Image (cartoon, helix red, strand yellow):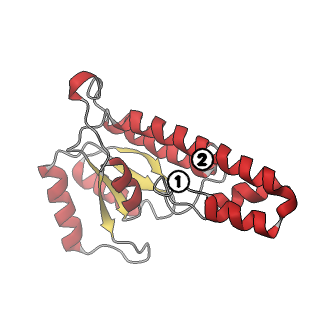
Amino acid sequence: MDTTTTATMILTAGRTWPWARSTSPTSDGLIQADPDNAEAYTANAKRYINEIDATDAEIRELLTEIPASTSVITGHDSFGRFAGAYGLEFLSLQGLSTEADPSAANMARLIDVIRSQNIQALFHENMISPALIEQLAEETGLPIAGTLYADALASEGEASTWLGMMRHNARTLHDALAEPGHGEGGDAHDHEH
């Protein structure tokens, strides 16, 4: 494996989105272990941070067209960091576990929330069974607007890389929930916290 691949794999595995901007501990560790390739590790870290920053800016621009009052409904609670970074509210049928089915009371509560908050769409998640979201769609009449990726990458396509997954999720949310013109001029909502 070449140093570019190694550095990218380690930097990807060790990062959170987009909160930790520094690759210094990772690149420093690689440089200490392999000083002959220090220049490559440093260059790759800088390149990757630039890619992260560009993707983050693209996501922020897309999400400004989603009204701040919008809630996103998914199968389980796996988008906390994404929600915090971009000022979105995610509601889920399940908690953090993908093993347990939601109770009838939780399902009824979520249906009430959907109706009271005028939710526009539901979203599948790649790592959980679509049955619960499909049931919720049937009971509420809401469309399923696509698949969001959280706990694993896609086997191919845009969401098969970490940055691609982030762009895919933002575009999927934007395409389903954006209100054209919402983010223009003085009406722009800052989704940052």
Three-letter amino acid code at disc 1? Answer: Arg
Three-letter amino acid code at disc 2? Answer: Ile
Q: Where does the image place residue 42, in percent across and percent down from the top left?
A: 72, 52
Q: Is residue 5 left or right of residue 48?
A: right
Mark 2 crowd level (few <14, some 14–19, many ≥20, 10 Å Cα): some
Q: Quadrant of residue 50?
A: top right
Q: Is residue 141 left or right of residue 19?
A: left
Query: SS class of the residue under badge 2?
Result: helix
Q: From what the image shows, is residue 125 above or below residue 177?
A: below
Q: Residue drawn at (69%, 60%), measured in percent from left and top?
A: 27
Query: Which disc, if any, is residue 49?
Result: 2
Q: Where does the image place residue 75, in percent across and percent down from the top left?
A: 37, 61
- 1 and 2 marks in contact (CB < 8 Å): yes
Q: Can you identify the residue that label 1 sits on?
A: 21
Q: Where does the image place residue 95, in percent across and percent down from the top left?
A: 34, 71
Q: Residue drawn at (30%, 73%), measured in percent from left and top?
A: 102
Mark 1 crowd level (few <14, some 14–19, many ≥20, 10 Å Cα): few
Q: From what the image shows, is residue 93 above or below residue 43?
A: below
Res 156 visible: no
Q: Where does the image place residue 9, in percent across and percent down from the top left?
A: 70, 59
Q: Residue drawn at (60%, 47%), measured in percent from left and top?
A: 49
In front of the other: 164 or 186: 186
Q: How many marks?
A: 2
Res 125 visible: yes
Q: From what the image shows, is residue 120 above or below residue 181?
A: below
Query: SS class of the residue under badge 1?
Result: loop
Q: Quadrant of residue 112?
A: bottom left
